[in-house]
Amino acid sequence: MMDVGFIGLGTMGSRIAANLVKAGFSVRVWNRSRAAIDELARVGARPVESAREAFSGDAVISMLADDDAIREVIVPLLDDAPKGLVHVNMSTIAVASARDLATQHTARQLAYVAAPVFGRPELAAVGKLNVVVAGDSTAIARVEPLLDVIGERVWRMGDKPERANVVKLAGNFMLGAAVEAMAEASAMAWRHGIAPADLLDVLTNGVFTSPAYKTYGALIAKEHYDPAGFRLSLLLKDLRLALAAADSNAVPMPLADVVHEALLDAVAHGDGDRDVAALAKVAMRRAGREVAQGVQT
Ligand code: NAP
């Protein structure tokens, strides 16, 4: 059985790692804060004391928050990593960083596979993510048994890792646009006396029946923003990355600008750690709900 390291036991990583343990893999786990390591140890993972100890064996999966975390935690490990190790990076990072990381790995005879995922923690917990994978095909073949446990489907995007990140960022831009569309529609309907829950019931069971609309529509309808399944500040990061990828190749994305600005508004009002569905608060505030509530009380 493959010996696997896992770095980054946040909302997504903890569930993915637990799932690999359940599937019978031997998983060495490391996280910056200790509590998550202890929790994984309780379900059968092998705790290690440093990221370096996790970055070894046949393969290592990283699921850190962003580019900064990868630079801080992973890059210093590359020089001493065992040659031939396959690093599967599932974090949503910049297209340019994925390209850089691939070069840095190759120079040290390490394999870099980009495998960002679609799906919230509930799906991660049951191995039903959509995994978008790109990188050297031999390296991907070696980690396929892991990807098959993690994902309901594994989508191959070719041998350049950054291609998977392009797809992921395009997808998260669309997710942000979907949530923003429901937020604005809910605000307009609310102003006309229609409860967002009633509006979204019609729409997400009628013409907008995809998982993205249904999942976030239900959260908006219930104003269920805590605890965050997908933190709003992480989606803001993704919109920044999508806009950077667009900018580098001179692609206007005006809708992405709108979503980016709404996310900034949410963060400025203290909602960065709440769920992405809290975009509805921004649209409601702009439609005067707080003023209306103030008048009533
Ligand atoms: P999260 O709950 O915030 O977890 C982030 C992880 O990164 C934690 O393990 C955290 O460690 C670690 N980390 C952050 N900065 C670090 C640093 N400077 N040094 C060391 N460790 C650091 O995020 P998440 O929801 O699991 O998301 C992880 C990645 O998956 C992100 O790139 C996100 O965009 C992507 N993603 C998320 C979802 C979703 O629905 N949540 C879906 C698909 C993809 P601590 O525990 O010590 O803070």
Image: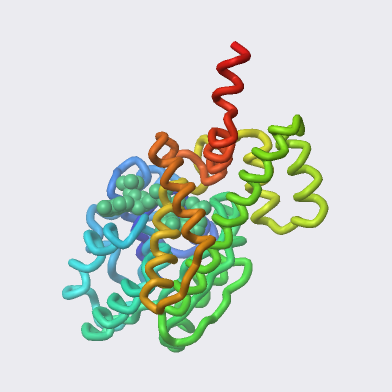
**Residue at 28% over, 57% down:** 69
Q: Position of residue 253 (x, y in %)?
A: 49, 67
- 249 w.r.t. 19: above or below: below
Q: Position of residue 26 (x, y in %)?
A: 42, 63
**Residue at 34% over, 81% down:** 111
Q: Nearer the viewer, residue 59 or 250?
A: 250
Q: Position of residue 9 (x, y in %)?
A: 39, 52
Classify the position of the N terminus by image quarter: bottom left
Quarter of the image for residue 283 reads top right
Observer able to see residue 21: no
Q: Nearer the viewer, residue 135 or 168?
A: 168
Q: Spot the residue most to the top.
A: 297
**Residue at 36% over, 68% down:** 60
Q: Is residue 101 left or right of residue 285?
A: left
- 259 w.r.t. 191: above or below: below
Q: Position of residue 254 (x, y in %)?
A: 51, 63
Q: How is the image coloured?
A: rainbow
**Residue at 59% over, 28% down:** 289
Observer able to see residue 188: yes
